[in-house]
Image: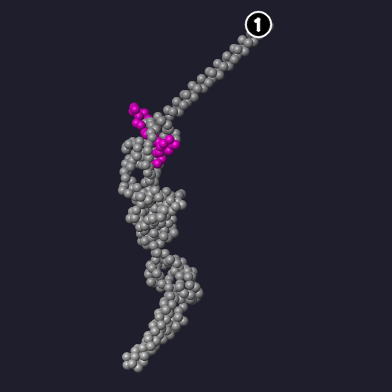
Amino acid sequence: MKNAMRRRLAIVLVLVILLVGAAVGFNMIKAHFIRQAMAQNASVPQTVSTATAEYSEWQPQVQAVGSLRAIHGVEVTTEVAGLVRKVAFRSGSDARAGQLLLQLNADPDVAQLQALTAEANLAALTYHRDLIQYQAQAIGRAQLDTDAANLKSTREQESAQAALVAKKTVRAPFSGRLGITTVNLGQYLNPGDPIVTLESVDPIYVDFRLPQDDLARVAVGQTVHVTADAFPGNAFEGKITSIDPLVDPSTRNFQAEATIDNPEHKLLPGMFVRTSVDAGAKQRYLTLPQTAITYNPYGETVYLVRKPAKAGAHPTAQLIFVTLGPTRGDQVAVVKGLNAGETVVSSGQMKIKNGTQLVVNNSVLPLDEPNPTPQEQ
């Protein structure tokens, strides 16, 4: 019995040793093949595009969005009531200052004016006749004073009636472009009823807001560039004419106003625009396309393209840290960590690491425009 038990234990022990050895051997073989696969994968060159770091001049700018406002804008109305006798303009046309826009029926008022004019003339004649009699001491001073007061009163009534008649004629208060009117002949208008809008659009104001941090960079007289989605590729230029001294306590933003030349009347009040203010003198920065930068929690990096050590070999990637400056369009300024003339990977960083062999293909390059004009397709 004891010999049988010993044989069974020996057999079990041998089997356990064989299983453990097989498992260890299998893992060693698997690790060997994994190392070979990784080595083969690491040695496969990766295709990337590249860009060369070069110096370029930058105009520091402050970006904002704004809206357009007419230099002079008003909704033309009437001060007095009356029936419309004449509409002397067309919707959407240009008007000159003082141009007749609308005429209300003024016949009763004109008749009343003529009657007051006759009364005033009679009062003047009476005053001059009594003045001669007063000089001849035929009447007293009181009578002459009464005649003078009567003459003044009638003249004032005549002037008031003449002003009322003039208000029946509505004229353009300034030159500009007229809007669309809904007033018709024979329509009765009450005081304050809208007739038509009148907007002076050349030049035109643009109002925009900036954070208080930019207050020291913006001043009256600086150049402003304005673009509108309605006219892609067109830029309009003007000057800052006013800066609001009050900073909004809820947003900590301040308002600026610029005047833009608009000779073709393309820009209209109420339009949304993008503004760029030239803030300060031009600067010289080392520039890269923004796609060349890899942003990480521990800093920004780029991959340098290192030349091969021997002829026929592939260049390799070297990861370096950089310090960035301002951005403009598709470009970013590098202020530290990179030298002019060095070549960096501009696309394809996700599939490479430090030491990866590279194949450079620049047939398709990322955008590198300082003032891009993207178009929706």
Give the class, few, some or many, for how many residues have Cα within 10 Å of label 1's Cα (few <14, many ≥20): few
Residue occupying the point 41% across, 83% down: 154
Q: Residue at x 50, y 22 (%)?
A: 31
Relative to 69, say whether 292 is above or below. above
The image quarter in which residue 141 lies: bottom left
Q: Residue 202 at what x, y percent from top left?
A: 37, 62
Would residue 121 be counted in the magenta stretch? Answer: no
Q: Quadrant of residue 269?
A: bottom left
Residue 232 visible in the shown view: no
What amino acid type is highlighted by mark number 1? Asn
Q: In this figure, which residue is indicated by the disc labeled 1?
A: 3
Magenta-colored span: 288-314
Give the image quarter of residue 309: top left
Q: How many marks?
A: 1
Q: Quick one: 194 or 122, which is closer to the camera?
A: 122
- Comparing 339 with 78, the one in front is 78
Please, is residue 5 above or below residue 149 in the view?
above
